[in-house]
């Protein structure tokens, strides 16, 4: 992780307000943030049905994470497992789990579960390659 997270502290997350890093959560009471998680600016998180972001997860800027969709009435907890990485401008839909060490390419539409240790990208997301572990 290098020096980037040496001084990391849990950010103050208030209902519907930008954090000091300029990302926002609705339904704060159903949002769980892991240790040394990094969320990019202008990311929106709707945690109505639960959003769990585990330790060391990295989320790029301008992402959207939805635990409910009013367009197609889907809903469900979103879980981003330890050390996964989400590229900028990606959208994570309700009920999706992204596995440990998985990497999601920028501008991806993630509408299904992604297993551990893969690289996936696209609209809709597709697995590009399997790996033993991604650093």
Image: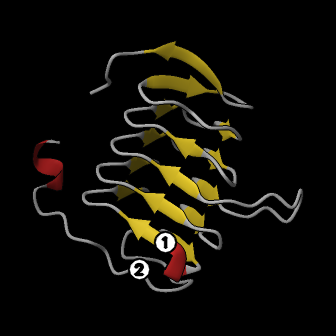
Residue 14 percent across, percent down from the top left: 45, 85
Task: Report helix, strand or loop for mark 1.
Answer: strand
Which residue sits at x=39%, y=15%? 131
Quadrant of image for the N terminus: top left
Task: Report helix, strand or loop for mark 2.
Answer: loop
What is the number of the mark on residue 31? 1
| In the displayed structure image, the side of residue 124 where residue 52 appears, left or right | left
Report whether residue 41 is seen: no
Sequence-first tag of 1 and 2: 2
Dividing the picture into quadrants, the one containing residue 10 is: bottom left
Residue 123 lies, with reference to residue 7, above or below; the image says: above
Quadrant of image for the C terminus: top left
Check disc 2 and report the residue beneath it: 13
Residue 24 lies, with reference to residue 69, above or below; the image says: below
Crowd rating for badge 2 (residues with CA inside 10 Å; few <14, some 14–19, many 20+): some
What is the number of the mark on residue 55? none
Q: How many numbered marks have been drawn onto this rendered protein structure?
A: 2
The scheme the figure's colours follow is: secondary structure
């Amino acid at each position: 992780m290098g020096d980037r997270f040496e001084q990391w502290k849990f950010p103050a997350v208030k209902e519907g307000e930008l954090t000091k890093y300029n990302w926002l959560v609705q339904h704060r009471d159903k949002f769980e943030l892991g240790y040394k998680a990094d969320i990019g600016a202008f990311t929106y998180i709707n945690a109505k049905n639960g959003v769990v972001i585990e330790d060391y997860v990295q989320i790029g800027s301008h992402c959207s994470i939805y635990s409910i969709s009013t367009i197609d009435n889907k809903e469900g907890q979103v879980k981003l497992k330890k050390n996964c990485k989400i590229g900028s401008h990606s959208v994570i839909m309700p009920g999706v789990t992204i596995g440990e060490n998985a990497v999601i390419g920028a501008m991806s539409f993630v509408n299904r579960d992604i297993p551990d240790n893969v690289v996936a990208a696209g609209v809709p997301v597709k697995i590009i390659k399997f790996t033993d572990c991604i650093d």
